[in-house]
Image (tube, rainbow, N blue to C red):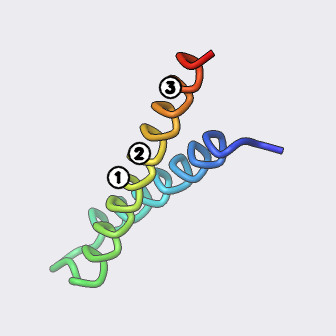
Amino acid sequence: MPDDLDLLKKAREALIRERRNRAATIVSTSGSIGDAALDALIKVQEAIEVIDLAIEELRYEEDEDEDDE
């Protein structure tokens, strides 16, 4: 079973693909960009940032555990 770090990395990769797709959609849209499209892009970016923090915390905990041994 994958560990938490692997799961977070896979979730991050999926969100990055989602962000690229949403950005491409916004760019290809002619005319004004809707607030909903921008809000969705921002929410995906925020989720990526939260996952980045969780990855950092897990790596820090792993380093602390190694230091304790």
- Of the numbered discs 2 and 3, the one sitting upstream in the chain is 2
Mark linked to residue 52: 2
Q: Is residue 50 above or below residue 9?
A: below
Q: Is residue 36 left or right of residue 64?
A: left
Mark linked to residue 64: 3
Point 28% across, 67% down: residue: 42
Alpha carbon of mark 1 to alpha carbon of mark 3: how far?
23 Å
Q: Secondary structure at mark 2?
A: helix
Disc 1 marks a residue whose amino acid type is Glu
Point 50% across, 31% down: residue: 59
Q: Nearer the viewer, residue 67 or 42?
A: 67
Alpha carbon of mark 2 to alpha carbon of mark 3: how far?
18 Å
User: Quadrant where the C terminus lies?
Assistant: top right
Q: Position of residue 55 (x, y in %)?
A: 48, 41
Q: Nearer the viewer, residue 5 or 39?
A: 5
User: Quadrant where the N terminus lies?
Assistant: top right
Disc 2 marks a residue whose amino acid type is Asp
Q: Quadrant of residue 32?
A: bottom left
Disc 3 marks a residue whose amino acid type is Glu
Point 21% across, 83% down: residue: 35
State the residue position of label 1: 49
* In contact (CB < 8 Å): disc 2 and disc 1: yes
Q: Secondary structure at mark 1?
A: helix
Q: Position of residue 10 (x, y in %)?
A: 61, 47
Q: Secondary structure at mark 3?
A: helix
Neighbor class of circle 3 (other Cα within 10 Å; few <14, some 14-19, many 20+) is few
